[in-house]
Amino acid sequence: MAEITTHDLLILGSGLAGLRAALSASIASSGKIDIGLVSKVQLMRSHSVAAEGGTAAMLRPEEGDSFDLHAWDTVKGSDFLADQDVVHRFVRAAPGEIMQLEHWGIPWSRRPDGRIDQRAFGGHGYPRATFAADKTGFFEMQCLFDTLTRYQNTTRYDEWYVTSILVEDNQFRGLTAFDLATGEFHVMLAKALIIATGGAGRMSGFTTYSHAVTGDGIAMAYRAGVAVKDLEFIQFHPTGLIPTGILMTEACRGEGGYLRNADGNRFMERYAAGLMELAPRDIVSRSMITEIKEGRGFKGQNGLDYVHLDLRHLGADKINERLGFIRELAMKFVDVDPVHEPIPVRPVFHYTMGGIGTDIDGKTNVEGMWAAGEAACVSLHGANRLGTNSTAECLVWGKITGEEAAKFVAGFEGEPKHPDGAVARSRSELFDGLLGRDGGESVYKIRADLRRNVDENLGVYRIEEELQKGVEKMAELKDRYKKITIRDRSKAYNIDLMYALELGCMLDLAEVAFIGALRRQESRGGHARLDYTARDDENWLKHTVAHWTPDGPELSYSDVTIDTWKPVERKY
Ligand SMILES: Cc1cc2nc3c(=O)[nH]c(=O)nc-3n(C[C@H](O)[C@H](O)[C@H](O)COP(=O)(O)OP(=O)(O)OC[C@H]3O[C@@H](n4cnc5c(N)ncnc54)[C@H](O)[C@@H]3O)c2cc1C
């Protein structure tokens, strides 16, 4: 029998969104709520610690910034697919999060006069990226973690891998998990759940994301009957270090760095003469790929042709103070010192705009279940996210969902019910299903093929023929997945088993992304089609919604909330 643990509230994921939600629920309940905080990695290894550049917030109305300007930048950046009521709420809540972290002790970088500093970021009409050197996420995580230790009401389950979300009668009931250290299977019951499992960057082979970012929470929610939204919109960050994909933060350009082609020219002049290197990411990435395709890039190994990110003119002092971590990464990984040499970079799979569909409070269509952070699609980023809006989103919706879930728990009558049928199904899927398969297929080969498929057919530019090929390949890979053999049978740290489960999640999500991208016959934000180059507001100003069925995703479409700005041509 499985061990059963019970809490009021389960938070799945201990990145920025999960930690902020735990603090928020604790504060809202005056420390009374009993929280279980589950993470497949140790708490400070969540991907959020890797965020470098900053967190967006309107802090300086006296110097020309405003809520409306931040909102407009976000809506235009999203190529008009963001829900505008969500955007308005976001921009108004973000400054409070910056000040809250300040009061909890984060070391924000400062101006010489001691006030919080902010820097420029792509697509933002005012320099509103609040930052802590180039380790913003690390300091934010540490600040939240420190503060959470003041509360005694949270039990941590580090290195527990959650395998399914239990839902019965459209009500959230609990999770199933195994403790990686012991291999023991557990059932975790609760009145409410907040999913904060982050994105799905590792479905690509060339990505900025850490190995654990495999979309588990999105896939588990999808399988449990929750609608997922807008998964075809993937963000390519312009500056991934060659050949690893390690991120060279956009702050490099925010601090004044240039992009140069093989002729030494600042080619952004041709594509976005106004904002140049600080145009939004989708536009800069497309410009770089065009330069490379037209022969003005540098030849790299394994098809990873590149251009140069040039910081030399910033000088050693500025680079050391503001971009010290970037200098360290470039020197350690490619032996390039940015003080003296340009850095080789190309667009890299960076962010999933889509995710678990929620309402403006982060609530899903299942009773007692919320989602926050990158795993969620509250529809803030639409078709293209602006840099620094994501960490801010994690904080804002971490707080909102924590409060909402605490309220729900306070009004919950009785104790969480053990869902016998759902537990039995999850158990059998794991032990008889996954571990029982013995067709000889290798998880690692399927994973490599999945990543190749995504990189080759779901890239910066898309076209019907490749998308169709991608969809067919997904069917083949899913078929092969049914025949895998998990060779490792040990209980302690069975990484083979974990990789197999993660692969299953990535296969489900990549399938939805491919089908969504094939159907969407237009170009918008991160979805750029060579065969439908224009944005088509008449037919496609709508969100893609996918529901799980045994035969693959069932797609439908939902309206975009447009309450302030009608779509116009997007020029920078
Ligand atoms: C290199 C890099 C730099 C970035 N820089 C910036 C920036 O400067 N500004 C900005 O705004 N955004 C930035 N981003 C994006 C931003 O950091 C992320 O979107 C955000 O941190 C995601 O936080 P999260 O809390 O949603 O998820 P994560 O931090 O990814 O945490 C996910 C959590 O879920 C847990 N989990 C997942 N699956 C399971 C499972 N099956 N069982 C148990 N636990 C599970 C993980 O263990 C982890 O604790 C950057 C991203 C990267 C990769």
Image (cartoon, rainbow, N blue to C red):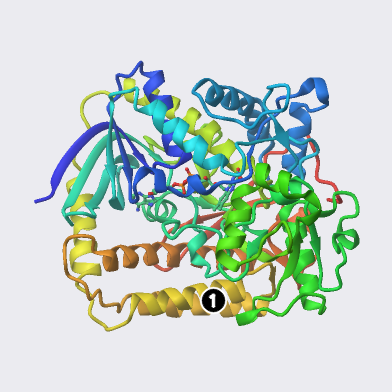
Quadrant of the rendered structure where residue 551 is?
Answer: bottom left
Q: Is 314 above or below relative to 347?
A: above
Which residue corresponds to the image point at 50% horizontal and 79% vertical from the top-left? 473
Q: Work out which residue is located at the far bottom of the displayed protein and give it.
A: 440
Q: Element under label 1?
A: helix
Q: Is 27 above or below relative to 223?
A: above
Q: Which residue is mark 1?
A: 453
Q: Give the image location of residue 384, x and y in percent.
A: 68, 51
Q: Nearer the viewer, residue 224 or 122?
A: 122
Which residue corresponds to the image point at 36% horizontal and 18% vertical from the top-left? 29
Q: Work out which residue is located at the far left of the displayed protein and give it.
A: 1
Q: Work out which residue is located at the far top of the displayed protein and give it.
A: 30
Q: Nearer the viewer, residue 564 or 201?
A: 201
Which residue corresponds to the image point at 16% horizontal and 54% vertical from the top-left? 184
Which residue corresponds to the image point at 36% horizontal and 34% vertical from the top-left? 368
Q: Using the rendered image of the protein, determine whether residue 404 is visible from the camera's viewpoint.
A: yes
Quadrant of the rendered structure where residue 298 is?
Answer: bottom right
Q: Nearer the viewer, residue 154 or 420?
A: 154
Determine whether, in the image, residue 224 is placed left or right of residue 334: left
Determine whether, in the image, residue 401 is placed left or right of residue 517: left
Amino acid at the residue labelled 1: Asn
Q: Is 472 above or below relative to 343?
A: below
Q: Give the image location of residue 274, x and y in percent.
A: 90, 49
Determine whether, in the image, residue 140 is placed left or right of residue 430: right
Q: Give the image location of residue 432, x and y in percent.
A: 18, 67
Determine whether, in the image, residue 25 is placed left or right of residue 483: right
User: Badge 1, how many Cα within 10 Å: few under 14, some, many 20+?
Assistant: many
